[in-house]
Amino acid sequence: MSYRELTMIDVKELLRRRAAEHSSRKIARDTGTDRNTVARYLAVADEMKLARDREPTEAEVHEVAQRVQARPLPDASSEWPAVAGHKKRIEEWLGKKRPLRLSKVHTLLVRDHGLEASYATVRRYAMEELGWRKRAPTIRLDDPPAGQEAQVDFGKMGLMLDPVAGRTRVLWALVITLSFSRYPFVWPTFAQTTEAVCEGLDRAWWFFGAMIRTMIPDNTRAIVKDPDALNPVLVAAFLDYLQARGIYVDPARIRKPKDKPRVENQVPYVRESWFDGETFADLDDARRSAEHWAGETAGRRVHGTTQQVPREVFESTEKAAMLAPAAEAFDVPIWTDKSKVHPGHHIQVARALYLVPSLYLQKPVRARADKTCVKIVSAAPAPSWRVAS
């Protein structure tokens, strides 16, 4: 079975969701963490009697991680790696147009390939590693509660002259649609980066004058580092943004547009109604135009599905149920992964050198840098923060 060591930011996310009264099953599903792993961290948090009415401090996160990660890992089942050695073969048999029954797969592996493992182990491996007989996603017919959810997607608009670069570039639009009212916001950008996403989201909250609690974003590299269908890993800087804003996220799967249908259907509408046939002086001009279009055209039309005016539904019902937006833009940090400490007791972050204690010489560390400070995270079994100024 695959194993992923949780970093400090991962542990903080588990404890943050615990404070929000999420169940262990929901935490495991939304964060892509094994349920047994989630249970261990939550059990330690309960033993420490961490308060549930607030988010954990860095000291508390460190203590929980230290207690859990200090425990010895159990030995893997001897049968599990034997089954894992036949992964491709099992995938082929189960992925056929007429798939083999799993009992037949076990019979063939034992008879023709010398597998020494029980059917129960093969069944558990197929379910946990290959998603065999995984329940089909439930299609929600009703909209989520007012102020609860927004769906986010990047859409390609077309080519536009960038006077700064002096050439024609592809213009993208970050489209944020409130799921309850269908009120949209559009943020044109030339880049699909984490910085562009965070900037666009903050602009959306200021446009709405309010902020949602849950977000279903596109599975873009600016948001999702590892787009695994079962265990997606978020980009560290974007997870920082979510924690700073108090937003929870459930990324859509790759090539699964039905995971975010309310915004997926908006992208062609944005392109055809706002972008096509228009000429913009520069990116700022395009952004002003898109904001005006979202509020006065898309927001004031009668929505085809709801048969209501999105802006009116938002102002009369949804806005009051949303969170207050942040006053300042988010300072998107830079993360460096597994940098080794130089023999001179330093590491380089954003073209600057920072001293690290001798204890971590020649050992991998992670660093987080923003405009105010640099935090160096030890990759040792007992994780810790050291603030460098």
Image (cartoon, grey):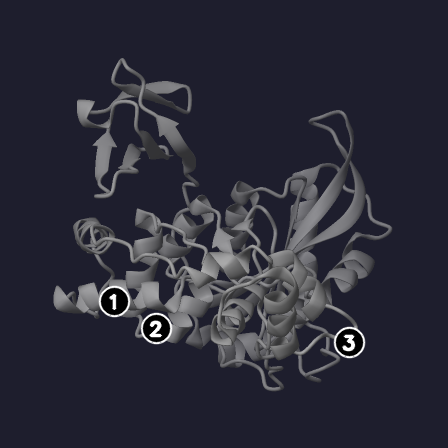
Q: Residues within 10 Å of mark 2 (few under 14, many from 20)?
A: some
- CA distance separating discs 1 and 2: 8 Å
Question: Please, which residue is most extreme toward the top here?
Answer: 344
What residue is at 33 percent from the left and 63 percent from the top? Answer: 37
Please report the residue visible at 63 percent of the width from the left and 70 percent of the height from the top: 259
Q: Nearer the viewer, residue 21 or 242?
A: 21
Instruction: Name the mark on residue 24.
Output: 2
Three-letter amino acid code of the residue under disc 2: Ser
User: What residue does disc 3 label?
Assistant: 98
* Kind of residue at badge 1: Leu
Which numbered circle lies on residue 42?
Answer: 1
Q: Quadrant of the C terminus?
A: top left
The numbered mark, 3 or 1, whose residue comes first in the sequence reads 1
- Of all residues, the one furthest to the left in this rendering is 48
Q: Secondary structure at mark 1?
A: helix
Picture layout, residue 71 above or below residue 353: below
Q: State the separation of the CA atoms marked 3 and 1.
A: 42 Å
Question: Would you say residue 52 is visible in this rendering?
Answer: yes
| Callout 1–callout 2 Cβ contact below 8 Å | yes
Q: CA distance from mark 3 to mark 2?
A: 36 Å
Residue 175 makes an appearance in the image = no
Give the numbered dot on residue 155.
none
* Amino acid type of the residue tagged 3 in the rendering: Arg
Closest to the camera, between mark 3 and mark 2, is 3
Tell me the element at label 2.
Answer: helix
